[in-house]
Image (cartoon, rainbow, N blue to C red):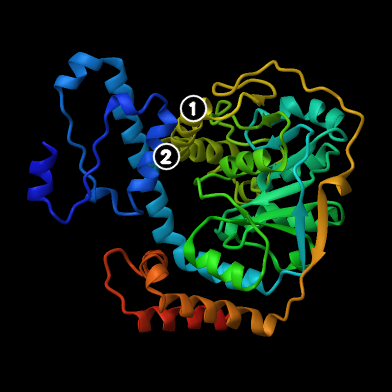
Amino acid sequence: MIPVLQERFKDSTIIALHIKDFSEPSLVQKHLEEKIPNIDVNDIQIIEWRPSLNHYKEAYVNLLSQVVDFIKRTDAGNRTTAAFGRRWIRNFFRNLKNINKNLLYKQAEIPVIITGSSPGLEKALPLIKEMQDSCIIIAASSSYLALHHNGIKADLIISTDGGPWALKHLYPFFRHGSCDNTALAVNLCSALPSQCCETPRLLINDGSFWQNIILHELSLPSVLIPQRGTVTATALELAMILSCGNIYLAGMDFSFNDIRSHVKPYSFDNLFFTCADRFNPFYSQCFTRSSLINKGGSMDIYAAWFKTQLPSWQKRIFAIGESNIFETGVPLKNNSGKNKNEYFKIAAFNNNDSQIAEKGVAALFAALKNPEYAENIRHELTSLLFSSGKKVTDDELKTEINNIARTQ
């Protein structure tokens, strides 16, 4: 079939997946990520060879389901990019001007606790509080309020969301004065409040060409973690980089507790309470919200991704409390204590904010003239700044980037 398809569809990329080549589900996802660019999923066609089903049976079905999961995840990512691409670049240049301190790291050997904001976090809070002086705690920004309410101090608050609502999770962090002992782990495309200028930042680089070029030109250290669509996946990969010890997950249920979608207290609670009345009660809003999230299917997509990746990770990732994905019941041992100075260091960044954006843009434009990088950079930025399928000249691209960088 392959030669015939190649002859008929000369401009298409044809990928043949042989079951014998993919012993682990994670290999399928990795292979497709490498082979398929960030394109419209409507341009992807699955062609099955049904006799394989009779021979390979369950293995065939598993391989096909992995391909479908990849397409769903790609589609979700494309829709997010189309909605927020311009905002991401605007955030990037705005955040560049607000960097004054970088957080450098050396790999530790102590456990790491990652907290998400699912309802299951509540049961884990007493243990996290007991163990907080023996672990590195990485908290999704949406879980910060619950941690603070229970007297728990995180070492890192991680935020990767570029939407304006992400600021609601970070405002309490600065309002409570926690930034004196806690750093931020952020992608520069995230939505960050201006108050974070003096807060040390561990920069997360998603590996895109345009980000790499600017960060390299400005000599800004960063940790490389590809975008996964959910902050919990980014936090997990960050934990594996920061420590070779066991990793414990709390509040990553990927499910609802009845109509409850998040831990209490939660940053968005005030939004629902303030607009509640007898015609639109608080619990009715929660019911509607949970129904919409379930219909969106994002939780199922993320849960499927984690299940796929588990076999490829070292057996050192466990859950605190209940989980339908990760192993539970593995004890979290109390160590003698932690000394953050052993594996974290704050470095000042000489930031001339009047020139930093200009330097970044100049490096990007120089790379556009380099045939080795130009095509990839052009593809990345066009998909972020313009509607899908639109043909854009380099001059139009440069004008758009200049306008965004100068107005931040």
- Give the percent coordinates (x, y) of residue 220: 67, 66
Closer-to-camera residue (150/35): 35
Q: Which residue is mark 1?
A: 307
Closer-to-camera residue (229/146): 229
State the quadrant of the C terminus.
bottom right
State the quadrant of the N terminus.
top left
Q: Earlier in the sequence, mark 2 or mark 1?
A: 2
Corner quadrant of residue 240: top right
Corner quadrant of residue 374: bottom left
Q: Residue furthest right?
A: 336
162 shown above or below 398: above
Residue depicted at 69% across the width and 15% down the height: 329
Q: Which residue is mark 2?
A: 30
- Give the percent coordinates (x, y) of residue 189: 57, 62
Tell whether label 1 touches label 2 (CB within 8 Å). no
User: What is the three-letter code of the residue carrying label 1?
Assistant: Lys
